[in-house]
Structure formats: C-alpha cells, structure tokens
Image (cartoon, rainbow, N blue to C red):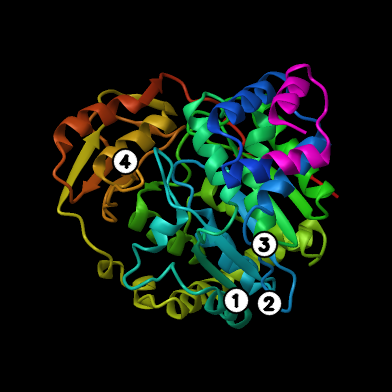
C-alpha cells in the first residue's frame, strides 16, 4: 500500500481498512509519511468523514502508538474527561467524591492552553503539590487513597501530539471523528475501565452549538463501546463560567468549598451528576442510588478527607483546606461595578477566559509562566438583579499588566435586560449512555 492510494480512497469517500489506518499512523509517527501527505489525508477526512469503525480503528492506532498503561489498582478504574471550559474545576470535586465511594480514580490530566484552564496548573497552585510523580507512586497512591491526579507522560499517545499539531496548522481541527480520536485515544491509553465524558457546549466551549456537541458526545460513546469500555457522555452548558471563580488557586479554593457543601448550584449540579455517572459505570447502583451516594460523600466529609489525603500523598500542604492564606496571594486587585440597573442576562464565557488569560491565569504558549494568584471571582451571575454601582466581580493578578484597562474591558462581558428570564438554561442538557 502507499499513502497516495490511501489519500485517493478517502478523497473518494471509500472506507479505509484497519490495516491501512494502522499503517498510516505508524508511518506518520516514524516519519516515513511526511507532513504534506498527512495533511492531505486529514483534509480528505474533514470533507468525507470516517465511519464508526474507521474512527475506532484510528483511535486505537493512536492509543497504541506509545505506552499503553493499565494501573493495577485492584479495583474498577474510572476516568473523567472534560472537553474544556471556563471555571471548570470539576475534577477537583468529582475525583474525591468517587474515591470516597470506593471507586478508583487514576487520572492523568493536562495543562491549560488558551482561554481554558488545566487541572494540573490548578493543583500546582497548592504549595508543594507534585504532579510529576513516578508511575509506580501514581499507582501506589491510587491503591492507598483511591485517587491520584498527575501530568501525562511524554510517552503516551505520540501520534496524537503529532497529528494534533498538524491539524492546528492546517485548519483540520473541526472534524468530529478527529476530535473524537484525539480525546478517546488518550483515555484508552491510560487504561480506564469506565469513562465519563463532560462535553461542554456554548460560548466558552470548543463546541459552540448543541448539535455539534451531541454529535461529538455520541461519537465518543460509540468509540468507547466498540473499544470495550463502559462509557457515558454528559452534555453540560458553558454559556457562562462554571461556578464563581476563574483562575488556578481561586478555583482550588472554590472546589474545597464545594466539598464543604458550599458550592454555587451550577457547579454542584454538574459535579454531582458527573460523580454519579462515574459511580454508575463502576456498578455501584442505579443512577438515583449513585447520586445519593455522591451527595452523602460530601455531606459526611469523606470526600473532603480524600482530597486532603491526595494532597498529602503528592507532597502538598493540606493545611490549605482550612487556611486559604497559605496559597500565594495576589499583589493587585480591582473591583468591577454594574454600570446600570437590571437583570444580568448573559456573561460572555469565552471573553471571561481571555481576560483571565491576560491577567496571567493562563498561558498563551506552552512556555508561558502561570500566575497562580491571577483570576476572577464573580459576585453576580446570570439571572441576578443588580443596581448601578453594585459590585459584579473582583479581578486579581500579580503580573505587570494594566489591570485598570482590563477591568474596563471586563465590564463589557455582561449583558443586561429589564426583566428576568423566567426559563434559565439547563446546566445538564443530556446524558448519553454507551451500554
């Protein structure tokens, strides 16, 4: 076979065989297939798509391009993945809840890039917390505490790293089979028995429309099923930031508050739904029983104890749970006030993320240094009534940015109406089960 023949087949919308897909992925990783030919194939896939079988084959070929790990924890391993959003700190809430209910959560997470935050960056805002632990310690921590969260190793899914970089440079990112393969290859390579996917939709998400989010969710669930995994996708709203905090240490604090039972309702609803689905795929009971189990893990303090145990096992100072002053403190802050009376009808989620990025909470390149103190804490959210001059939010940073200019731009992310919307958007839009 030749790459020329394979490109021609896909250009004419002919299905590729498993052998052809495996050959292409292996050849591209080894360097025998050049970028320009792989680019042509990716563009053909964008135009002609892939069948479920082709998508699964591509996913498995990418997963097998590097190390395939299977944490031997002695229990059912369940993983959770979010497609990315603003203020999305659910892993820090969900993993301790699920571990407290007796299910293992060995999770390898990524860093933030662009306007969405990364779990690893958030955890590293905890003094002393080590996300680069050896694999043997990672597994030992899961056996002991039921959970561990660490950075992905460089030997996992090298095909995805190369293909994603090429997609990003050739305008072939927005293909559902390619997005699906990128996400699911990493989940399958890390050996999860069950996978729960949080597919974000809206202004702050990669998938802007519900139809696209549903197509992606269904595709990933089908691939998970064909790959022999128990898989569930939860479609959740990202039209506004999740919770009230955006930024690394600020989101960790909000997650701790959630485990103390004091979270904003939207954040708690998403977190408990995801935790319940993770327990469900692990066979812990009916959906209703699993939801109740998750709620009890918060109310009885066992989930908070699991977070404390994870922090200690990974070298962090668990005293931050009761003393937030132990986090690095911002040098500068700026309050933002309502310019008019009315009801808040919208908050631009993507613009919020971009402003948080400018404050220093995110990175514009992989080499950027994160300011763990930077971010935003909202006082008001969509649906709230405000009067002119009332505080909307506070911006924080320790970087040498123009916080006054940024605060003026930040005020424009809010939109107002004279009447309150009687039908607010549902935060959990749909649950798609793959078994």
Label 3 – label 2 distance at C-alpha = 16 Å
What residue sits right under mark 2 in the picture?
A: 73
User: In the rendered structure, which disc, 4 or 1, sits on the residue that comes first in sequence?
Assistant: 1
- Please name the predominant secondary structure of the magenta segment in the image: helix
Residue 205 seen in render: no
Q: For mark 1, give the secondary structure.
A: helix
- Residue 119, percent across and down? 46, 55
Q: Nearer the viewer, mark 3 or mark 2?
A: 3
Q: Is residue 295 magenta?
A: no
Q: Is residue 10 magenta?
A: yes
Residue contact at pointers 1 and 2, CB within 8 angstroms: yes
Q: Residue at x 73, y 63 (%)?
A: 279
Q: For mark 3, give the secondary structure.
A: loop
Say left or right for 384 vs 370: right
Label 1 – label 2 distance at C-alpha = 7 Å
- Which quadrant of the view contains residue 193? bottom right
């Amino acid at each position: 076979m030749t790459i020329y023949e394979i490109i021609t087949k896909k250009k004419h919308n002919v299905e590729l065989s498993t052998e052809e897909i495996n050959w292409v992925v292996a050849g591209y990783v080894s360097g025998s297939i050049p970028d320009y030919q792989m680019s042509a194939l990716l563009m053909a896939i964008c135009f002609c798509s892939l069948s479920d079988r082709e998508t699964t084959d591509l996913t498995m070929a990418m997963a097998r391009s590097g190390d395939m790990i299977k944490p031997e924890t002695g229990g059912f391993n369940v993983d959770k993945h979010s497609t990315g959003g603003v203020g999305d700190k659910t892993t820090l809430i969900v993993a301790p809840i699920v571990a407290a209910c007796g299910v293992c959560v060995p999770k390898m997470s990524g860093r933030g890039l662009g306007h969405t935050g990364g779990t690893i960056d958030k955890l590293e805002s905890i003094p002393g917390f080590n996300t680069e632990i050896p694999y043997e310690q990672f597994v030992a921590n899961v056996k002991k505490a039921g959970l561990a969260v660490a950075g992905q190793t460089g030997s996992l899914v090298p095909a995805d790293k190369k293909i994603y970089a090429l997609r990003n440079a050739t305008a072939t990112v927005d293909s559902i089979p390619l997005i699906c393969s990128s996400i699911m290859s990493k989940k399958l390579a890390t050996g999860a028995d069950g996978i729960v996917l949080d597919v974000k939709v809206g202004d702050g998400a990669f998938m802007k429309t519900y139809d696209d989010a549903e197509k992606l969710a269904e595709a990933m669930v089908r691939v998970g099923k064909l790959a022999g995994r128990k898989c569930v996708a939860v479609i959740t709203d990202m039209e506004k930031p999740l919770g009230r905090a955006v930024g690394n240490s600020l989101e960790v604090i909000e997650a701790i508050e959630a485990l103390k039972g004091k979270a904003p309702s939207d954040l708690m609803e998403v977190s408990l739904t995801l935790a319940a689905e993770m327990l469900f795929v692990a066979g812990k009971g009916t959906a209703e029983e699993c939801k109740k189990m998750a709620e009890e893990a918060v109310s009885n303090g066992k989930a908070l104890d699991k977070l404390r145990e994870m922090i200690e096992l990974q070298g962090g100072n668990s005293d931050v749970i009761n003393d937030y002053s132990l986090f690095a403190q911002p040098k500068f802050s700026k309050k933002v006030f309502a310019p008019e009376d009315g009801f808040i009808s919208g908050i631009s989620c993507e613009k919020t993320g971009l402003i948080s990025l400018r404050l220093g909470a995110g990175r514009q390149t992989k080499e950027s240094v994160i300011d763990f103190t930077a971010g935003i804490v909202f006082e008001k959210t969509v649906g709230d009534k405000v009067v002119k001059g009332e505080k909307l939010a506070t911006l924080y940073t320790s970087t040498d940015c123009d916080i006054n200019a940024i605060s003026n731009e930040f005020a424009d992310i809010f939109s107002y109406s004279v009447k309150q919307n009687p039908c607010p958007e549902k935060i959990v839009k749909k649950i798609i089960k793959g078994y």
